[in-house]
Amino acid sequence: EAQVTQNPRYLITVTGKKLTVTCSQNMNHEYMSWYRQDPGLGLRQIYYSMNVEVTDKGDVPEGYKVSRKEKRNFPLILESPSPNQTSLYFCASSFGGTYSNQPQHFGDGTRLSIL
Amino acid sequence: AQSVTQLDSHVSVSEGTPVLLRCNYSSSYSPSLFWYVQHPNKGLQLLLKYTSAATLVKGINGFEAEFKKSETSFHLTKPSAHMSDAAEYFCVVSDRPPGWSSASKIIFGSGTRLSIRP
């Protein structure tokens, strides 16, 4: 089954404790992306990757890191989480590298609470 | 610059009546436009997309949308609402800046929550 898998689905942690949210897709997609969803703001892009070893900042990259060592995986790293990073996070992937008018496939989301 | 405006944060309709969710966009280039639906505790699922072919686009579950360039609109409609349509809906624009190495810029609207009254 084609899918984007995020883990964990829920996480409560404390300020400053490094965490990683994993994302994996099994569709051989070139493009992968991370978003955060906050009430009234829709989804905002954090980072995206057009292919292996190619990543770039989205609209709200501060406080986050990503890596793309393999095509299928795109982890999101919070080196020193803060309460303003409490949010619902989505990973997405699609065909197309530099230009994509292809729809994205989304994971089920990761709800992070930073205390 | 790109932007997406969903004109209603919440729409409530009775079951069996038409649905209209409004979306206006601005784009510097030739955009692709999408509607996604998000059910509670789920990720987003594609309803339909416009990519410069037919201006009237049909999607899943009886939804359709019409691209109107002169009005910069891409409103989502359904003739008859069903209880299972209750969800959050997002209008999305994807635009590619010039340059072969530039990725598409993807902007989400703030969402419209659709409620269905029995």
Image (tube, coloured by chain):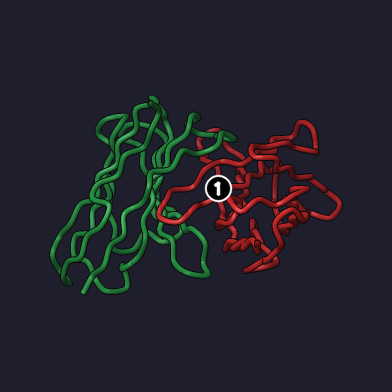
The residue lying toward the viewer, choosing from A50 and B19, is B19
Q: How many marks?
A: 1
In this rendering, position of residue A87 left or right of residue B82: left
Res A45 → quadrant: bottom left
**Chain A, chosen colour in render:** green
In this rendering, position of residue B43 left or right of residue A12: right
Question: Residue A51 at x, y = what percent?
Answer: 38, 32
Secondary structure of the residue carrying numbered label 1? strand
The residue lying toward the viewer, choosing from A66 and B23, is B23
Rendered view: A81 above or below B36? below
Most distant residue in the front direction: B118
What chain is tagged by disc 1? Answer: B
**Chain B, chosen colour in render:** red
Which residue is under mark 1? Answer: B105
Rendered view: A15 above or below B113? below
Residue at screen point 70% across, 43% down: B63
Characterize the local packing of mark 1: few (<14), some (14-19) or many (20 or more) Cα atoms within 10 angstroms. some
Question: Residue B101 at x, y = what percent?
Answer: 50, 35
Residue at screen point 52% across, 61% down: A42
Res A37 → quadrant: bottom left
Question: Which quarter of the rendering shows the N terminus of chain A?
Answer: top left
Q: Amino acid at mark 1?
A: Lys
Residue at screen point 62% across, 61% down: B114
